[in-house]
Amino acid sequence: MSTPLLEVEDLRVTFPTPTGPFRAVRGVSFSLGRERLGIVGESGSGKSVTGRSILRLLPPHARVEAKRLSFDGRDLLTASPREMRALRGSRISLVMQDPKYSLNPVMRVGEQIAEAVRDKGAGARRRAMEMLEAVRIRDPERVFNLYPHEVSGGMGQRIMIAMMLAPEPDLLIADEPTSALDVTVQMQVLAILDDLVAKRGMGLIFISHDLDLVSSFCDRVLVMYGGRVMEERHARDLRQATHPYTQGLLDSLPRIDDDRAELPTLKRDPAWLKD
Amino acid sequence: MIQVRNLNVTFGQGAQAVRAVRDVNFSVAEGESFGLVGESGSGKSTALRVLAGLNPHWTGDAAVAGVSVGQRDDRLPRLVQMVFQDPYSSLHPRHTVDRALSEPLEIQGIGDVGPRVERALSDVGLGPAFRFRYPNQLSGGQRQRVAIARALMLEPKVLLLDEPTSALDVSVQAEILNLLRRLRRAHNLTMLLVSHNLAVIAHMCDRLAVMNRGAIVEEMDVATLRRQEPREAYTRQLLLASRGYDREVAANIVTYD
């Protein structure tokens, strides 16, 4: 077996606070190949911090430690800022939740995509058009010249994805990429990601709070709670989860075809977070 | 209890005009829970805001318990109240829970404020210890409980709910949905619930209307929704897309105008 694209071993992230250190991530380990890995959890579970620490995009006061944090054989913890800049965008890319806040409001969307392309110059514009087509935007010539406020949420998110995929990264970290979108648009955006993973052999980390979505979209799932991985499963078997936290989350979801009068609420067990 | 006839809402004028709600009709019986479901821009929240008196520009008839919501009728605050989507922005950050809950009583000239506030807090599962806290000292779920308590201070007959759990984690969502069901039984509330989440609607409502582009596509009872046997293709697509990711479903999505 070839070496995995990304290896994370015993990742710990600590933020100093006035009331003492807050341990946002406490010993997370996983490895990622050319596959779709889902990270699910509720707010405060550490899923987004885990994603950001791979790109070293945390504020300077955050303390990031790990036995191993390597991408394509390169140690990310000791990489210089210059080396990190060379990785970010071109080899590891990040799509965030809300295109409203991640697109530059005073720059045409096409120019923003062209800016992300590796070879600058005349080719960049053509490449941006291709990317807009790849994310199934019907009229790329027109959309190229629009400003972010002139596009809908679904189109904005497709533009973000086009921008992040323009440099053909090996790893895409998508942090709730479809949570702000309608279900039908969400499906179409996921189909684009799905095709790109299959076609280009890209690795994908898909961070989400939506268990059903992750179990239907990803290959493997990590369930996080309180900065820890509670369990790891094949996505298809998520419904058969054994950990009480995962079970509790699944049970607390209302379902279209059930007529339970009362939804079971989650009982959190402090033992889950014992060292 | 709720009557809506030929409701139309238009934003903007001339060529820029957007018909946010088009010829919408529905009625909700006393004690019934009715859902409005649709994607963003379907007009579901706009219709709800008309009933809450938050949208003055509309035509048609809309009445709660026989009182038209078109005039600023003094009876309305005691008939109908609303809970908003985001508990982080619907509570005044510098008002204590006590102030948020006593304000409606003071405006309406209702006495006995202290005991009423404590009763309202215990009604939504918060102890008296929460009475003098500020919103920033509460979790999202606790804030939404306070917002629900505030809506119930004047003992309204109708509760309007605009995506009451979509800003919350799923485990907290379950707690709030259970609370709303319990309060509905205890106070014989009529509920109008707006949501994009079909499962939440199926759990909470007796009947529902599916909206798209401002118009009602179809109305059905919850049994039809649970059997997943809608009449319209639009609703069928919405149901399929809600089930999770499926490459084939994604390839066949069409836009309905």
Image (spheres, coloured by chain):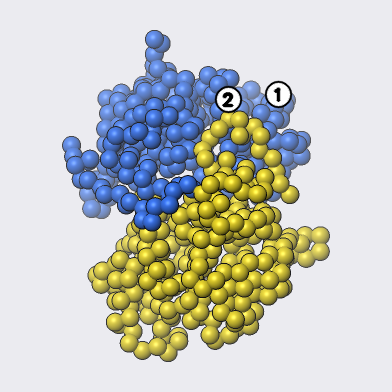
Which chain has been coloured blue in this picture?
A
Task: Inspect this view and state whether residue A77 appears.
Answer: no
**In front of the other: A53 or B92:** B92
Q: Which mark identifies residue A221?
A: none
Q: Position of residue B41 (x, y in %)?
A: 64, 55
Q: Which residue is mark 1?
A: A123
- Kindly state the secondary structure of the residue where label 2 is placed: helix
Mark toward the start of the polypeptide (2 vs 1): 1
- Tell me what residue is drawn at x 57 percent, y 77 percent: B64
> Both on one chain, marks 2 and 1?
yes
- Tell me what residue is drawn at x 70 percent, y 36 percent: A137
Q: Position of residue A39 (x, y in %)?
A: 40, 35
- Label 2 to label 1, Cα distance in Å? 21 Å
Circles 2 and 1: CB atoms closer than 8 Å: no
Task: Inspect this view and state whether residue A159 appears.
Answer: yes
Q: Which mark identifies residue A196?
A: 2
- Tell me what residue is drawn at x 40 percent, y 23 percent: A32
Q: Amino acid at mark 2?
A: Leu
Q: Amino acid at mark 1?
A: Gly
Side of B67 where B19 appears, left or right: right
From the viewer's perspective, is residue B132 above or below residue B179?
Answer: below
Q: Residues within 10 Å of mark 2 (few under 14, many from 20)?
A: some
- Number of labelled discs? 2
